[in-house]
Amino acid sequence: MITIILNRKKCIGCSNCELINPFFFKISKIDGKSILLKSKKKKELFILKQVNNFFLKILKKTSKICPVKIIKIIKSN
Ligand code: SF4
């Protein structure tokens, strides 16, 4: 399983995440920042747990392509 963590406050709204991974990320029409779809807010972080390992490759790519490095991917078992 994979956990995705987005530190949304630091997002600069470049849209890279949405472009390569629209299944998980969407740019908000309200503030222009990325939304991690179906995530839960915990303090300043948005967290999506129990993502299938099938998505690991594309999520790692998404994390890498973020210019401010605010998308963390944590793999467990
Ligand atoms: S790639 Fe990073 S900075 Fe760009 S919109 Fe997505 S989360 Fe924000």
Image (spheres, rainbow, N blue to C red):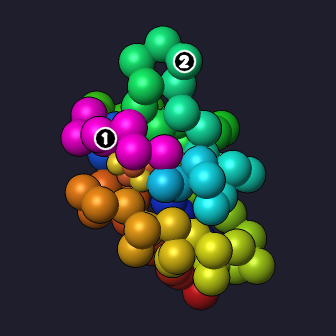
Magenta stretch: give its range. 9-15
- Picture quadrant where residue 59 is located: bottom right
Left or right, residue 40 beside residue 56: left
Disc 1 is placed on an element classified as loop
Image location of residue 37, percent across then percent down = 63, 39
**Badge 2 is on which residue?**
29
Image location of residue 17, percent across then percent down = 52, 54
**Badge 1 is on which residue?**
11
Residue 63 higher or lower than 44, as above or below? below
Q: Nearer the viewer, residue 28 or 8?
A: 28
Distance between the alpha carbons at the discs numbered 2 and 1: 14 Å
Image location of residue 24, percent across then percent down = 65, 50
Residue drawn 51% across the image and 67% down it:
62
Disc 2 is placed on an element classified as loop
Whether residue 60 can be seen here: yes
CB atoms of marks 2 and 1 within 8 Å: no
Residue 50 higher or lower than 10, as above or below? below
